[in-house]
Amino acid sequence: FTRSPVAARLELGNACASPRPLESEAPEDGPSWQDVSLSVASILVGAGLLGLPYAFQSAGAAAGALVILGATAATCYTAKCLVWTFRALNEGKRNDPSTVGAGYVRTYDQMAEEIGGPLAGGLLRTALLLECLGAIVCFLVLHVSSWPVVFDLPLEVRSVLCEDVVALVVCAAALPTTLVRPRVLSAFAPVGLLATLTLVAAAAAIFLLDGSIPRADGERCPPLGDGRAERAVDYPMVRLE
């Protein structure tokens, strides 16, 4: 249950991590309920922290709450459908050994290939790669836009934009994690859980303090409309160009 959600997702989405098992005693049911529930909780907490203020500000308290609750229900039901699909496919293979074919289903792309053929498996692998790329961009934008505000950094450091310095530091810190197996990263799951709880507590504090927390100098933190968010979103696009 303490496995990292990111590690679980990478292992499930990587068809090359291990061959498909041909023996019935191998793990056959795909991800466990614990894996799925932990991944869903992580996704919902992250989406809620990023989307909750915007939803409430744009749609109001009632409509914003309905949007968040609807997205939560859809995500949970989709996760349950994934587990049911894994179990149904592998149960059919156990009942009729002639349908084992390439082996039991263990990953998302294998499930898509089992249902829709090689084309579906390839499309899902592409979608997973795009999802990883999107997560990297969101991760970079979040840090680039947050660090200057949280630490009150200057706009430039020795004629270098502060956003560039933050991006380099974040990439340098994250690079070592790409060189180890996802299962090893699960050791950091307690740290991630503590960080998530800290973010939830901070979000609750901001909500209770009417969306603003005083800084050490007595001033208020810059609002989202001060232009930093727009510059942060433009940052990766400018660098790609």
Image (tube, rainbow, N blue to C red):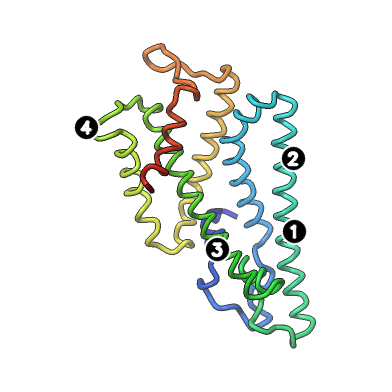
- Asked if the residue under mark 2 is in contact with the one under mark 1, i.e. CB atoms within 8 Å, the reply is no
Q: Residue 85 at x, y = what percent?
A: 74, 65
Occupied quadrant, residue 107:
bottom right
Question: What is the CA distance from the residue labelled 1 to the residue labelled 2?
Answer: 16 Å
Reading the chain from its start, which is encountered first: label 4 or label 1? Answer: 1
Instruction: Tell me which amino acid carries mark 1.
Output: Cys
Q: Residue 180 appears at what percent x and percent y?
A: 40, 62
Kindly identify which residue carries mark 4. 159
Residue farthest along the left direction in this orientation: 158
> Which quadrant of the figure contains the N terminus?
bottom right
Q: Is residue 43 above or below residue 144?
A: below
Q: Which residue is mark 2?
A: 70
Distance from the alpha carbon under mark 1 to that under mark 3? 21 Å
* Spatial separation of the CA atoms under disc 4 and disc 1: 53 Å
**Of marks 2 and 4, which one's residue comes earlier in the chain?**
2
Q: Nearer the viewer, mark 1 or mark 3?
A: 3
Residue tagged by mark 1? 81
Residue type marked 3: Thr
Tag 4 and tag 1, C-beta contact below 8 Å = no
Q: Amino acid at mark 2?
A: Gly
Residue drawn 40% across and 27% down? 150
Q: Nearer the viewer, residue 34 or 210?
A: 210
Q: Is residue 103 left or right of residue 74?
A: left
Q: Earlier in the sequence, mark 1 or mark 3?
A: 1
